Amino acid sequence: MQQPPFVSILMLTHNAPDLVRITIDTLRAKTDGVTYELVVVDNASDPETVELVKAYEASGDIDTLILSERNTLFAEGNNIAARAAASQATHFCLLNSDIEIRQADWLSTLLARHTSGVTAFGMQQDPLRVDGYCLLIDAPLYRAEELDESHQWWWSVTKLQGNLLTAGHSVQGFFEHETYLHHFGGGSGDAFKSAQGMNVTRDEVYGWFHGHKPRILDPWPFKAKMALTKIQRKLRNAPRRIFRLLKRQ
């Protein structure tokens, strides 16, 4: 008999206590139908944020709390959280601490569409890839791969999904997700600017995918956005084209 899903939600905090509060409060109030735990690694936050996460641990809203004396950034921090997760976890969900959960079936929706690999809310282009602020992955796959800590920030997630696609696993995502959750973005400041492994070339990133592409679970919103972007690009370029035409006359 298949084991029921048990999700270890992995969350990193670094300052921004107001956003941390929104994330944890809405997570606990609006997550139904899934057995889960919350594992938090605090990355050397300011005193207000540290006291806040300690209070959540005392109230039972954080199941496991690790207080780091330094900012481990994204890749190492999530690896630390994964190693501290319950051994019975079937899945990990990497969830940023600048998220507002809006619909109680957000996690069960990810699980319902999930196949071996990664399922996420949020997608990016060039190359087409899922974002890392709400990313569900099979726990055994993550434990076998982990995030590459030589890429301390978001490229670690991109490289992971390239590796999974190349190995024959699924990577898929929802482009539009505001019904389920909102990602504020930028809550932890600009620590990424000094992160290692950010200066990768476009060719290197594409090389991770070996020609494979993630699946878009809601293609129509994605196509509409791409069409709008193309129109906006043409409108931005229109004055230059008109100027060149006038110059020729």
Image: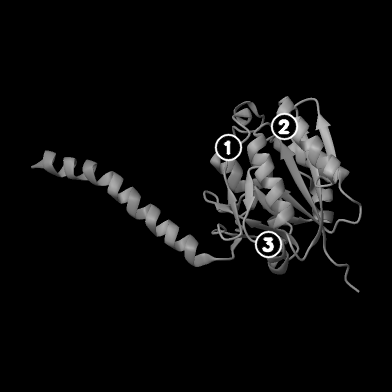
Q: Alpha carbon of mark 1 to alpha carbon of mark 2: how far?
A: 16 Å
SS at badge 1: loop
Q: Confirm whether residue 118 shows in the render.
A: yes
Point 82% across, 39% down: residue:
80
Q: Which residue bears the numbered disc 3?
A: 104
Q: In this figure, which residue is indicated by the disc labeled 2?
A: 49
Q: Nearer the viewer, residue 183 or 49?
A: 49
Tell me which label, 2 or 3, sits earlier in the chain. Answer: 2
For label 2, the crowd category at 10 Å Cα-Cα, with few meaning under 14, some 14 to 19 and many 20 or more, is many
Q: Are marks 2 and 3 in contact (CB under 8 Å)?
A: no
Q: Please tell me how crowded label 3 is: few (under 14), some (14-19), or many (20+) other residues with Cα within 10 Å.
A: some
Task: Measure the alpha-carbon separation of dots 2 and 3.
Answer: 26 Å
Is label 3 in contact with label 1 (beta carbons under 8 Å)?
Answer: no
- Residue 199, given in percent of the width and then of the height, sits at 59, 32
Q: Considering only order in the chain, which callout, 1 or 3, is on the residue closer to the N terminus?
A: 3
Instruction: Tell me which residue sits at (59%, 36%) in the image.
Output: 200
**Which residue, given by chain and number where applicable, does mark 1 sit on?**
186
